[in-house]
Amino acid sequence: MNALQSVIMGAIQGITEFLPISSSAHLIVIPWFFHIDDGNINKLTYDVMLHFGTLLAILAIYGKRFINVVVEGLVDLRGGRLKDSMLLKLIIATVPAGVAGLLGKDLIEHSLRAPFIAAFMLVFVSILMIIAERLHVSRSTISYPVAIAIGIAQALALIPGTSRSGITITAALLLGLRRSEAVDFSFLLAIPIILGTSIYEMKHLDVHGGAMDIYIYGAVSAFVFGILSLKFLITYLKKHSLDLFAYYRIGIAILILLYSF
């Protein structure tokens, strides 16, 4: 992998981490399309650096709001007012993905990385997106059952081809949340998951050797394109539906099937 290829991979990670189009599916297609060989780098270290870049990106957009949620949650805890605590809802919603990630890591890495599974999940979630956009139901608050259901949906994002933002926003819409609420809760929920993943993967960090510049290019690219894609999605969904992303995902599914053959 050279510097340009590292920038490309970082950009793909930053874009697909936040747009509802599945980062895992694109990481199947893009290296093949651009003939990217990662044999000269530590792949685990590179993944850690890309996750670090996307973590900084989401903190740049939602960090202040997340801190406010934490502060308000601690105040609610001291005052015994946890019933409507957004912090507690985020914690509860984070548990399913955290447990699934820890207990199902080997299954995910060795059994669910098949192209057919990624293609199926791309299409399946696309259908859910299209259905969700045609349901005109809304509620004003995020209840604990709704938070738990979105958390379970987030756990499904461990399956390649799903897309964490895609499945959580879609689940929120299907459960009746307004689009703005669905987007905000989805990305507030992403912060502890991305942070936890980054911390967990730190044990694989190895910055020795001559590839440090490759790692930095990838992290910076993931950070920049992560911010751009997240801002784009927030603005886009204020006036448009998820349909465009659903149709794009179906196209990627077809490409993956063609690639697998």
Image (cartoon, rainbow, N blue to C red):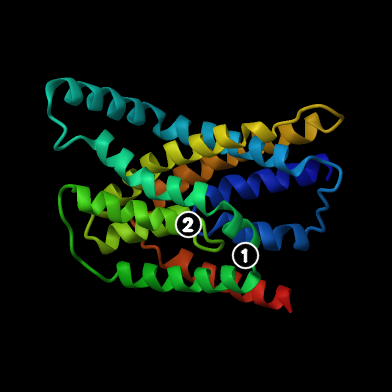
Q: Amino acid at mark 2?
A: Ala
Please, is residue 59 above or below residue 254 in the view? Answer: above
Residue located at (43% from left, 36% from top): 192
**Numbered disc total:** 2
- For residue 111, the mark is 1
Sequence-wise, which precedes: disc 2 or disc 1? 1
Q: Which mark is residue 139?
A: none
> Where is residue 85 drawn, in percent x and y?
20, 34
Q: Secondary structure at mark 1?
A: helix
Q: Quadrant of residue 188?
A: top left
Q: Is residue 68 left or right of residue 228?
A: left
Q: Nearer the viewer, residue 67 or 109?
A: 109
Residue 249 in the image: state x and y as whole percent: 53, 68
Q: Judge whether residue 18 can be spotted in this image.
A: no
Above or below, 50 against 72 in this view is below
Horizontal side of residue 97 vs 50, given as left or right = left
Horizontally, is 129 left or right of 139 in the view?
Answer: right
48 or 108: which is nearer to us?
A: 108
In the picture of the structure, the residue carrying the numbered disc 2 is 157
Q: Nearer the viewer, mark 2 or mark 1?
A: 1
The residue shown at (27%, 48%) is 181
Amino acid type, residue under disc 1 in the picture:
Ser
Q: Is residue 128 above or below residue 142?
A: below
Could you say where residue 19 lies in the image, as x and y percent from the top left? 49, 53
Q: Residues within 10 Å of mark 1 (few under 14, many from 20)?
A: few
Instruction: Tell me the element at label 2.
Output: loop
In three-dimensional space, the C-alpha distance between marks 2 and 1, rounded to whole angstroms, equals: 15 Å
- Determine whether 248 is above or below 138 in the image: below
Q: Position of residue 175 (x, y in %)?
A: 24, 61
